[in-house]
Image: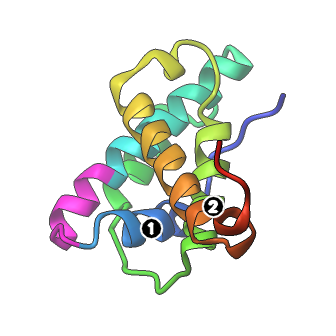
Amino acid sequence: MSSFIVKNKTINTFLSFLNNNLSDEENTLIGRNLLKMNIEATEQRYSEPYLNAKEKRQELKNFKFEFVSTTKIQALKSLSCFLYQCSEGNIPSKKLFKDFRKKEIDLAFEIIDELRVYKEAEWG
């Protein structure tokens, strides 16, 4: 499995959909924590600093939440991509990872529940 640091837009896409009741400042803080987790996962994958310390601090410092108009499906795809990139080392055991994995599962089931084929499927 390979790992890379996602674009800020990827994080902003799923945060825009999931955290629409939070302020931009709150989403920026969450986004920075998510980006930090992504950097840590990538470093663990390659057993060396992916970016030097100065560049990492700059990436985190410059992250700013920007609302992205998106669909439920795109939000799920962006979140799934992000979590996949963070599935290295000890990152999946972190609370932040687990919280967003739960959000991914909840969103997937919400999408499935809206499908006509699911509604028409036999229960029991």
Front one among 98 and 116: 116
Residue 87 in picture, x, y percent from top left: 63, 27
Question: Dot 1 surroundings within 10 Å: few (below 14), some, or many (20 or more)?
Answer: many
**Going 16% across and 66% down the picture, which residue do you hit?**
25
Horizontal side of residue 117 vs 98, given as left or right: right
Q: Which residue reaches farthest right?
A: 1
**Going 37% across and 77% down the picture, which residue do you hit?**
66
**Residue wearing tag 2:** 112
Residue 4 in picture, x, y percent from top left: 70, 42
In this rendering, the answer to whether 75 lies above or below 105 is below
**Going 40% across and 20% down the picture, which residue do you hit?**
94
**Residue wearing tag 1:** 12
Residue 49 visible to the viewer: no
Q: Amino acid at mark 1?
A: Asn
* Res 112 → quadrant: bottom right
Magenta residues?
21-30
Quadrant showing the C terminus: top right
Front one among 50 and 72: 72
| Secondary structure state at the residue bearing disc 2 | helix
- Distance Cα–Cα, label 2 vs label 1: 23 Å
